[in-house]
Amino acid sequence: MNVLNKDQLLAIICVSEPLVLKDVDGIGEIYIKRLTVSDQGEIAKKADADDNVGSGLVMIAHCVCDKDGKRLFADGDIKQLGTMSANHMTALVTAISEVNGFDEKLTDIKKN
C-alpha cells in the first residue's frame, strides 16, 4: 500500500467541484454550493441549533449561488427568505442536502 503525500491527500479530500446545477422541484434550475468544513462552521455560528427553520434559511443563503459561486443571498436577506412558502423551503433544503450528502449521512445514522 502506498502512503499518500500531502498533495495527493489534499487532491482527494478538498472540494474540487464546488458547484452543482440542480433542478429544484417547483423552482427551476439553480446552482448549489458544495459546503466545505469551513462553510459548515460559518453556518453553525449563524444558525440557532434549536430553530430548524432559521437554520434552513441560513443554509439556503449560504448555498444558493450564481454560476461563479457568488452567493445570491447575503446574511441581510435571510429575513426576506423567511417569507417563502414552506414547500419552496423544503425543496431548497432537500436539494442542498442531496448535493452535500446530508441525506446519505442521515440514512447511515438511522441504519446504525
Image (tube, rainbow, N blue to C red):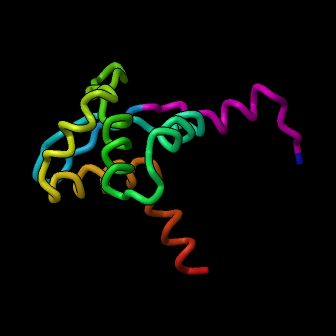
Q: Which residues are magenta?
A: 2-18
x and y percent of residue 22 in the render?
Answer: 26, 43
Residue drawn at x 52%, y 40% as measured from the top left: 45
Q: Would residue 56 appear left or right of 29 to someone viewing this image? A: right
Residue drawn at x 27%, y 36% as measured from the top left: 78
x and y percent of residue 14 in the render?
Answer: 62, 33
Asked if the magenta segment contains residue 14, the reply would be yes
Nearer to me, 69 or 78: 78
Nearer to me, 82 or 68: 82
User: If the image is split into quadrants, where does the C terminus sit?
Assistant: bottom right
Nearer to me, 74 or 97: 74
Residue drawn at x 13%, y 43% as measured from the top left: 28
Q: Report which quarter residue 34 is drawn in.
A: top left
Q: How many marks?
A: 0
Q: Report which quarter residue 68 is drawn in.
A: top left
x and y percent of residue 107 in the render?
Answer: 49, 71
Image height of 60 relative to 111, above or below: above
Q: Report which quarter residue 80 is drawn in.
A: top left
Q: Would residue 55 appear left or right of 22 to someone viewing this image? A: right
x and y percent of residue 55 in the render?
Answer: 38, 50
Residue drawn at x 20%, y 40% as measured from the top left: 81
Q: Would residue 34 appear left or right of 70 to someone viewing this image? A: right
Asked if the magenta segment contains residue 3, the reply would be yes
